[in-house]
Amino acid sequence: MTARIPILFALVAAVVSGAPPLRADPPLKTLGLIETVRIQPEDIDIRAKVDTGAENSSLDAREWETFEHDGATWIRFTLHLDGGENRTLERPLGRMTVIHRAGSRQERPIVMMTLCVGNVARAVEVNLAERPKLTYRMLLGASFLTGAFVVDVSQADLTRPTCDGAAK
C-alpha cells in the first residue's frame, strides 16, 4: 500500500500543475526471424531474414550499373527472385560504401528504398550486394526496425505486408 502513495501523489501533482497527460508510446509489433518484406512502389514481395545486428538492410542485387538521369547518378540493378523471376529496378544512387568482411573489401552501392513489413512502411538506406548463395535474398536491418518492432527469433512469418505505398 505504501508503494502506491508516491504514484498517487505524482498523478495528483500532475493534474494540479496543469502538466500535459502522460502518453504511452504505441506498442512495438513483434516480428519473427524470417518475414516477408514488400519493396515499394513496385510491390515486390521478398523473404527476408531479420538482422538486428546490421545497421542497414541489404538486398541481393546483380548486374548493377550506374547511369545519369536528370543530372543525377542513378543505379539500375536486377533482383533474382525466388521462383526464377528477375526484376530490374532503378533508384538514385545515394552513395557508395566499403564493407570489410573476413579479410576482404567490398564496395557496395546504397540506395533509398521504401520497404513495408506488416502495416509499417519506411524509406530506409539499403545496400546492394550479391547474395546468391544465401537462403534469403534480403537482410532487414535495425534502421527499419527501430522504434516499431521487437524480434522473437523463435518465430517466423508473424506479419504480411499490407502497406498502401506511402512511407511513414
Image (tube, grey):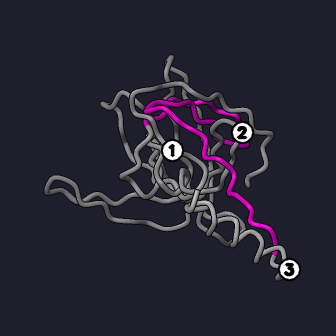
Q: Is residue 28 visible?
A: yes
* Mark-to-mark CA distance, 3 and 2: 36 Å
Residue at the location (33% across, 65% down)?
98
Q: Position of residue 68 (x, y in %)?
A: 62, 64
Name the amino acid, label 1: Val
Of marks 1 and 3, the one in the foreground: 3
The mark that comes first in sequence, 1 or 3, is: 3
Q: Which residue is mark 2?
A: 119
Q: Position of residue 97 (x, y in %)?
A: 39, 65
Give the magenta range. 20-49
Asked if the residue under mark 2 is in contact with the one under mark 3, i.e. CB atoms within 8 Å, the reply is no
Q: Position of residue 83 (x, y in %)?
A: 51, 17
Name the amino acid, label 3: Gly
Q: Is residue 145 above or below residue 50?
A: below
Q: Is residue 62 visible?
A: no
* Mark-to-mark CA distance, 2 and 1: 15 Å
Q: Which residue is mark 1?
A: 150
Q: Is residue 119 above or below residue 22?
A: above
Left or right: residue 12 versus residue 2 is right
What numbered label is drawn on residue 18? 3
Q: Is residue 73 above or below residue 139?
A: below
Name the amino acid, label 2: Asn
